[in-house]
């Protein structure tokens, strides 16, 4: 039986410490035919030297190039633009995690149960580990509400390093990229929002990757208690961090895909964006009835508070 062809896309930056463990886990993937495309985003350490060694051992399977620093969002979209469109599935990959051997085939098996004629996206929980791969906890938990446009516009439930997309998702997104990457919160959120809007997302509760938490990659808030989460959210809001990032990304999404959205979706997005220009009374009224929502009660309260404050 022919094995699925999967392209793994990795953006690296000063990842010398953990890159070998990740590469070994990618090469060890079972029941799939893989190629690995790597764009180094201007590393100044020995990342490229280590990657070249892998490319020499696996010629034709590992493709690497070193380019100037663009930042993580642009780097991953550049990978999408420059990668071939001849694969069955496409996966994003971070430089410092470790994948289980069946990570890809598990994702593909689940994707193959879905409607293959529409954009599809797989994502999963992760096994968070410390720098020595000691388990910390599983994150994120399985979303309790449907992964729809009305949730995805205001919350990302998909961890980018777990994402596997079908060829339709890959080709449609790279064929209509946003005009201003600075308006995007993150590349994975944009793709997640696209598929929630035009296709289907499947969330796997099994953590098929070890998601390493270290000094250069600390997942804020995932291990915090309720009080700590509230305090961090309040601090970010009071300091002006994250003001308007949701509305900016939503506006860019509307600009990019308006011709493909339903009339209802367009009206709901415009209502959300326009309410920010109204009085606080109007914003309070809208926050109580908005169709846009987040997964947890805590995060949904925060969303309503940000709408009322006019800082979405």
Image (cartoon, rainbow, N blue to C red):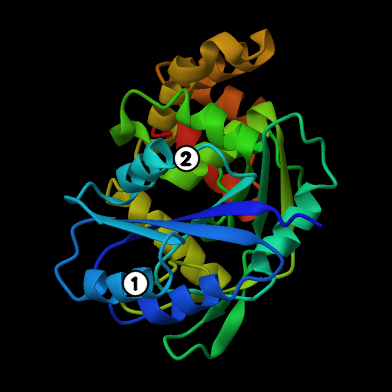
How many residues crowd around disc 2 within 10 Å: few (fewer than 14), some, or many (20 or more)? few
Rendered view: 73 above or below 137: above
Question: Which mark is on residue 56?
Answer: 1
Please state which of residues 287 and 157 is positioned toward the viewer in this rendering: 157
**Of tags 1 and 2, which is closer to the observer?**
1
Q: Position of residue 233 (x, y in %)?
A: 43, 56
Report, in whole angstroms, how far the alpha carbon at label 1 lies from the one at label 2.
21 Å
**Who comes first in sequence, dot 1 or dot 2?**
1
Apparent side of residue 15 relative to residue 60 in the rendered image (left or right): left
Q: Residue at x 43, y 41 (%)?
A: 80
Q: Residue 212: x and y, percent?
A: 46, 77
Furthest residue toward right: 113
Q: Quarter-wise, where is residue 198 in the image?
A: top right
Q: Relative to residue 47, is residue 221 drawn left or right?
A: right
Q: Residue at x 56, y 84 (%)?
A: 136
Q: Nearer the viewer, residue 124 or 41?
A: 41
- Quadrant in the rendering for residue 217: bottom left
State the residue at coordinates (82%, 41%). Answer: 114
The answer, for residue 109, to whether it is visible in the render is: yes
The correct choice, above or below, for 157 with respect to 290 in the image is: below
Tell me the SS state at disc 2: loop
Q: How many marks?
A: 2
Q: Residues within 10 Å of mark 1 (few under 14, many from 20)?
A: few
Question: Which residue is tagged 2?
Answer: 84
Give the left or right position of residue 160, taking residue 77 as reference: right
* Rendered position, 243 above or below 277: below
């Amino acid at each position: 039986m022919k094995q699925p062809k999967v392209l793994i896309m990795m953006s690296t930056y000063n990842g010398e410490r953990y890159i070998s463990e990740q590469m070994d886990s990618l090469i060890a993937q079972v029941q799939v035919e893989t190629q690995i495309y790597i764009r180094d985003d201007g590393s100044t350490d020995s990342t490229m030297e280590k990657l070249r060694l892998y490319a020499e051992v696996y010629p034709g399977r590992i493709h690497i190039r070193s380019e100037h620093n663009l930042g993580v969002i642009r780097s991953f979209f550049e990978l999408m633009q420059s990668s071939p469109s001849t694969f069955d599935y496409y996966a994003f990959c971070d430089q410092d995690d470790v994948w289980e051997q069946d990570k890809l085939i598990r994702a593909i098996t689940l994707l193959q149960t879905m409607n293959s004629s529409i954009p599809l996206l797989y994502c999963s929980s992760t096994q968070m580990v410390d720098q020595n791969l000691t388990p910390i906890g599983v994150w994120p938990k399985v979303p309790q509400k449907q992964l729809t446009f009305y949730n995805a516009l205001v919350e990302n439930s998909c961890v980018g390093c777990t994402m596997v997309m079908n060829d339709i998702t890959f080709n449609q997104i790279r064929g209509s990229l946003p005009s201003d990457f600075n308006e995007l919160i993150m590349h994975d959120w944009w793709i997640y929002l696209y598929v929630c809007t035009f296709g289907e997302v499947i969330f796997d509760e099994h953590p098929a990757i070890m998601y390493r938490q270290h000094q250069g990659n600390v997942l804020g808030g995932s291990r915090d208690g309720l009080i700590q989460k509230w305090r961090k959210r309040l601090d970010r809001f009071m300091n002006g961090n994250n003001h308007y990032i949701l509305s900016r990304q939503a506006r860019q999404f509307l600009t990019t895909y308006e011709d493909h959205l339903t009339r209802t979706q367009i009206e709901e997005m415009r209502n959300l964006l326009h309410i920010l220009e109204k009085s606080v009374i109007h914003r309070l009224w809208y926050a109580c009835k908005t169709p846009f929502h987040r997964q947890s009660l805590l995060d949904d309260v925060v969303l309503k508070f940000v709408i009322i404050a006019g800082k979405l």
